[in-house]
Image (spheres, rainbow, N blue to C red):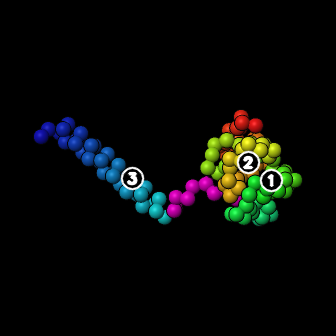
Amino acid sequence: MNSALRYRLGIVLIIVFVAIGSFLLGTYTKGERGGDGIVLSCDPNTLQALVIPKSSQQSTFVAAASAVVSGSKTYFASKNGKKFYAAGCVSAQKRIKPENVIWFSTAEDATLQGFTEGSSC
C-alpha cells in the first residue's frame, strides 16, 4: 500500500470517528437537558381569569371572554388550531371548546405565537 492511499484512508477514518463521536455526544447531552423546548408563562392573575370549568357551555365562554377582554385580552385561538379571532367572533366561539381557548392582547401577539388571522368573522 503506498503512502498516498494510507494518508487518504487515515483521513477517512478520522472523519468517521469524529462523526460517530459527535452523534453519541449529542444523544448523551440531549438526555441531560430534557428537550422541553420553549416554555411560555404569564402572571397568575391572567391564568386565574382564564380558568373555565370542563362542564362549561357557550354562556360560560361568553362570560369568560367578557371578563378577559376587560383585562385587555382581545383575541383568542384554539390551542389545537392555527387561526386567531377577535373576542366578539361568535362563529369561532361555537367551534372552539372553552378548555382549548388561549387569549392574546393584540393581533401581533397572536401572530408572533405562529397564528394567522381567521377570516370567518
| For the residues bearing labels 3 and 1, Cβ distance under 8 angstroms | no
Residue 47 image point, x, y percent: 75, 62
- Where does label 3 land, which residue? 22
> Mark 2 and mark 1: span between their CA atoms?
8 Å
Residue 74 image point, x, y percent: 81, 47
| Residue appearing at x 71%, y 48% in the figure | 94
Q: Considering depth in this image, is 96 or 33 the residue closer to the camera?
A: 96
Q: Secondary structure at mark 3?
A: helix
| For the residues bearing labels 2 and 1, Cβ distance under 8 angstroms | yes
Which residues lie in the magenta part?
33-42
Q: Identify the main secondary structure in magenta.
A: loop
Q: Secondary structure at mark 1?
A: helix
Three-letter residue code for mark 1:
Val
- Where does label 2 land, which residue? 93
- In this rendering, the label closer to the viewer, 3 or 1: 1
As drawn, the label of residue 101 is none
Return the disc, 3 or 2, that comes first in the chain's sequence: 3
Three-letter residue code for mark 3:
Ser
